Every structure is written in structure tokens, then in C-alpha cells.
Image (cartoon, rainbow, N blue to C red):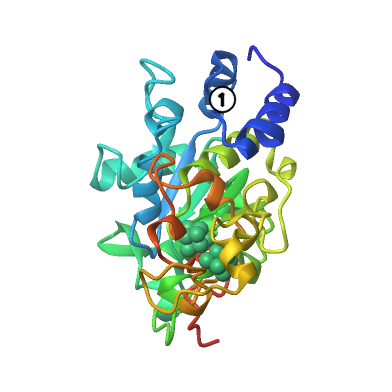
Amino acid sequence: MSISRRKFLKYSAGGAAVLGLNIFENPLMRKAFASAVQETPIIWLAAGACSGCSVSLLNALSPRIQDVLLDQVLPGHHTELAFHPTVMAASGDLAMQAMYDTEEKPFILVVEGSITTADGGRHCEVGESHGHGIPAVEHLDRLSRKAKAVIAIGTCAAFGGVPAANMNPTGSKGVIEVMREKGISTPAINLPGCAAHPDWFIGTVAAVLLGGPESVKVDEHHRPEMFYKKLIHDNCPLRGHFDAGRFAQKFGDEGCLYKLGCKGPVARANCPEKRFNGGTSWCIDNGHPCNGCVEPEYPYDHVH
Ligand code: SF4
Ligand code: SF4
């Protein structure tokens, strides 16, 4: 590795990632990351979700996910995203074998989607054994014990999210909740968002790989403070309207969106700075209230 871990972390977690700069612009940073991810590949377990977080991640422009985790970072090497059902070329037994081979080495487990626990977890299965589907909860139980760290990407994986909404017939839960129930103490980080911003994932993976999971300072919901510390409300371009008491009464009106249900005053994330779709826009710039998608209560109709 041509750059020290300390230097990389100082640059990424401490500065560039927070400021929204591209931590991979520096060739030394890219090399350091490439070397680390080669040592520690990623298994991506897709559980109860819509795959929106995968789509969001694949939409990363700067750096592109291909440059970060796929072959362009390491020309001629196989992907270091060792198992990802949406992007991997293999299918069936071959794909599952990639997971089983990878889990015999040091790896990071990324989980997208809620863990369905009702009916033995049969509402979400990944792969099969002897003609029967393997519940995602069984994979989580096995893989999270072996992994160096677990990253729950998206609100479904972090807190149950949409699959755990009102009635929750599948018994969907967040990854950390299930791990706790099983007494699994592997370090775990939540990256909620519906969908999660690609930079939140890439920045966290970089920090975990190069500094260890303990280097990522998290809040009470296990979210990295470098991305989830600031209130949307404090950085909202409509804050002047809020302070002046000018509220939109219907969509399209000028004014703060609070009376249309905006959760900006309780939601913590750097969406106003990062913006989505390659920095093009974000919820409030599109005239839509913040739905508070990064909070444990989302979608705000849970029956506990
Ligand atoms: S639109 Fe939402 S986040 Fe923005 S000022 Fe109003 S309440 Fe706060
Ligand atoms: S602005 Fe609110 S609803 Fe939109 S992505 Fe950020 S936290 Fe989620």
C-alpha cells in the first residue's frame, strides 16, 4: 500500500468525504483502497428489499462504482464485490458457490433489505439447498458471525423500513436487531436511506477497510456521524420561509413544506449538500417534503 491508513482516513473520513469531494481523485487513495478491497472482498446479501439501494449505488458517478469495486480498479482481477445478486454475471449454484468460497476468507458483509423472521424466514430466500430455499435470516446468522464487519445499507436493512410497515406479516426487522437477538456481536453500521446515497456507502466501506469498523464514529442508531449528523432542517434552502412563517398549503406553493408533512426538522443526513443523481437534485429541490427516510420511524406507520 502506497499510503498509510492514517493518512487515508484523515483525508476521507475526516475531510473529503464530509465535504463531498471525491476521495478517489487522488491516485494514491485509489491504490490504497484497491489494495484493501482486494484483501477483504464484499458479500452483498440482498434480503427483503426493492433493490433500490443497489440501483442508487450503481448510479454513483464520482467515483463510479465500477471504478471503486469492480474490475477497473484492478484491471485483470475478478470483482472484489464477490457476491452481489443484481450485478454478478453468475447465477444459480455458481453464484452461491462464489458466496461460500468468499466467506472462508476475511470479508465484509453488506446487507440490503429487511430480514424476514416470520414463518422461519421463508418470506425471503437466497439460493437453495437440497431443493429448498435458504432463508436470508439463515445466511445472516452464518455470515454475520464470520464477517469482519456488517454494513446494513438502506432503511429496510437498518430498521426494517417499508417491509416492516403497518401489519408487517413477514416479521421484517433490521439487521442489527436480528443480530442482537442471536447474540452476534460483530461490529455493524447502519446506512439508512430510501435509497441510501452511494457516497454514504462508498465512504463507509473505505473507512471500514482502511481504519477498521471502530474508526467510524456512529450515533445512537449506528449511523456514521460523518454523513448523518446534521439536521435536514438546518441546511434546507427553504429554512428562511420556515423562520418567517411562510408555509406552502399545497404542492407547488411557495414556502416551507412543513405543513405538507416535511420531516426535515427530525431527519439527520447530508442530503442538502450531497444531493442525489450525481449531485443533480434532492427531495426538497424537487418540491417534495423530506420523508425522513433515514430515521428509524420511517415510513412512520409502524405498528410495534
Ligand atoms: S421544507 Fe422541511 S426541512 Fe425545509 S425548512 Fe421547511 S420544515 Fe425545514
Ligand atoms: S431529504 Fe429526507 S426523504 Fe429525501 S433522501 Fe434525505 S432524508 Fe430521505
Q: Tell me: residue 2, above or below residue 255.
A: above
| Amino acid at dot 1 | Phe
Q: Residue at x 36, y 15 (%)?
A: 76
Residue 56 is left or right of residue 212, and the answer is: left
Measured from the top left, where is residue 139 in percent x and y? 46, 57
* The N terminus sits in image quarter: top right
Q: Residue at x 51, y 41 (%)?
A: 199
Q: Is mark 1 within 8 Å of ligand 2?
A: no
Measured from the top left, where is residue 227 in percent x and y? 62, 48
Residue 105 is left or right of residue 1, and the answer is: left
Q: Nearer the viewer, residue 193 or 304?
A: 193
Image quarter of residue 185: bottom right
* The C terminus sits in image quarter: bottom right
Under circle 1, the secondary element is helix
**Residue 264 visible in the shown view:** no
Measured from the top left, where is residue 164 in percent x and y? 45, 76
Measured from the top left, where is residue 170 in percent x and y? 40, 79
Q: Quadrant of ligand 1?
A: bottom right
Q: Nearer the viewer, residue 34 or 183?
A: 34
Q: Tell me: residue 183, above or below residue 260.
A: above
Residue carrying label 1: 33
